Image: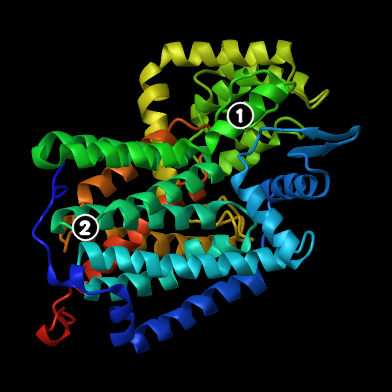
Amino acid sequence: MPNAGPESLRAHETVPFWRVLLEHRKWFVLFTLAALAVRLVFYFRVPHIAGDSLIYGDIAKNWLDRGIFGLTHAEGVRPTWIRLPGYPAFLVVCFKLFGREHYNAVLLVQIVVDIVSCFVIADLARRTVSTRAAMWAFAVAALCPFTANYTVAPLAETLSIFCVAVALDAVVAAFQNLERGSSPWKAWIVCGVAISAGIQLRPDGGILLATIGVYMLWRLFKDAGRRAQLFWAGALVLTISVAPLVPWTIRNYRQFQRFEPLAPRYASDPDEFVPTGFDRWTKTWIADYASTEEVYWQVPGSDVDLSLLPSRAFDSEDEQQQTQAIFDDYAKSHFVGPELNARFEQLAQERIQRHPLRYYMVLPAMRVADMWLRPRTEMLPLNSRWWEFEDDPEDAVRASLWGALNLLFLFAAVLGAVRGPRPTYFGMMLLYVALRSAFLGTMENPEPRYTLECYPIVLLLAGAWISGWRRWNRPSAQH
């Protein structure tokens, strides 16, 4: 785990963040205003109420009005467990303060949270690189359109990014306090609370807990003199992180007579039939977000145009005809029942047996690459088939420019990781990105938003690299 261990304390680590803000107040005020302007452009031009937003909102209203964590059905409100309580609780607070279904207020609160995240990322850069890196990381985070874009959608992404940033900043602060001999326990508590909140927002928030746990185990064996402190710190973070899941798990067992500490893999209630065969068949070929929109989200309920499937969805003409026959039967009811699901399962099994390497390695890698590299247009009124210039040249050009901007941010982050100045505790950060990316490869719906939880690290690395440019790196500006 390179560059992950304790290092000699640098001068900038002992400079309080408030002093950095005060000394460079013009810079931070300027980019705070820029951050607000960027987010308000999205707020007024492309606010987005997604399908998940309505689910969260329905749960929040029923929780607020009836005391039931449930969804509205034709026969009334029924308890649900398809979402963790974190984001519905956030909506409940907003509805209580600003009015029921006042989503504009929700978006404005999220804008504030995202701007606060920029300050947290700056503090993380200050702790791990330098004061100048903190300034540039703040600027990059303030101007990042991809995190800004999600502030204007009632979804958990903005709060999740904030929780990741706070948890990383807190764990770094804890280790630095440990190394300089001061008490780290307040930082450990903040870290645990941030991880816990992240898990309550999204089940995959537990990946950060696993990352910090692995890193702490590595430090436990390496740093013999602090084993007791590290052991109890790990126990404290773990306890705080998972404690809120206990009442949630008890509630689910009492309500549904099943053990579910998080949320179901396919976001379904116990009485719902899950077409796992269809999902498995989808994973035998899907690799891009366009297919998620055009196929995965259409079933059940809508027609599927098989001409939109990529060539890798069929290994032979016979298989194409077999797939067409299954979808012809599906088109009669727009529902995947047990019989149709079994046919999808058989088709998926045959494809996996023919090409196991494709299923277990190639396609997961392609899905991860798509989530990281494709134009992040899913929240914009742009065609997801951005490469089809002939069909819609204007959309294709705009999406391509958007994609080039995404690549620019990632390019700067990669240079920050390779050329530096590389942050301390970089190994822990890299492990988180690797574990999260590996997990995302197992999903059958590659959505670029799932990588945004890694963006505090991306923005930190990009800011660090920019701060290392020689023309900016003058002695008078060093701290």
Q: In the rendered view, would you say 71 is above or below 347?
A: below
- Disc ID at residue 308: none
Residue sitting nearer the eye, 278 or 134: 134
Q: Position of residue 272 (x, y in %)?
A: 73, 23
Q: Give the left or right position of residue 359, taking residue 151 as reference.
A: left
* Amino acid at pointer 2: Asn
**Residue at (40%, 57%) from the top-left corner?**
166
**Residue at (46%, 58%) from the top-left corner?**
162
Residue 216 picture quarter: top left
Q: Position of residue 324 (x, y in %)?
A: 67, 21
Image quarter in which the C terminus is found: bottom left
Report the residue that reaches farthest toward the right: 75
Q: Position of residue 417 (x, y in %)?
A: 21, 56
- Disc ID at residue 177: 2
Query: Which SS class for mark 2?
Result: helix
**Residue at (36%, 72%) from the top-left corner?**
138
Residue that carries the numbered disc 1 in the rendered image = 266
Residue sitting nearer the eye, 71 or 54: 71
Q: Nearer the viewer, mark 1 or mark 2?
A: 2
Image quarter in which the N terminus is found: top left
* Amino acid at pointer 1: Tyr
Here the colouring is rainbow
**Residue at (13%, 51%) from the top-left corner?**
6
Residue sitting nearer the eye, 369 or 384: 369
Q: Earlier in the sequence, mark 1 or mark 2?
A: 2
Q: CA distance from mark 1 to mark 2?
A: 42 Å
Q: Position of residue 80 (x, y in %)?
A: 72, 33
Q: How many other residues sit within 10 Å of disc 1, few (<14), some (14-19) or many (≥20)?
A: few
Residue 21 picture quarter: bottom left
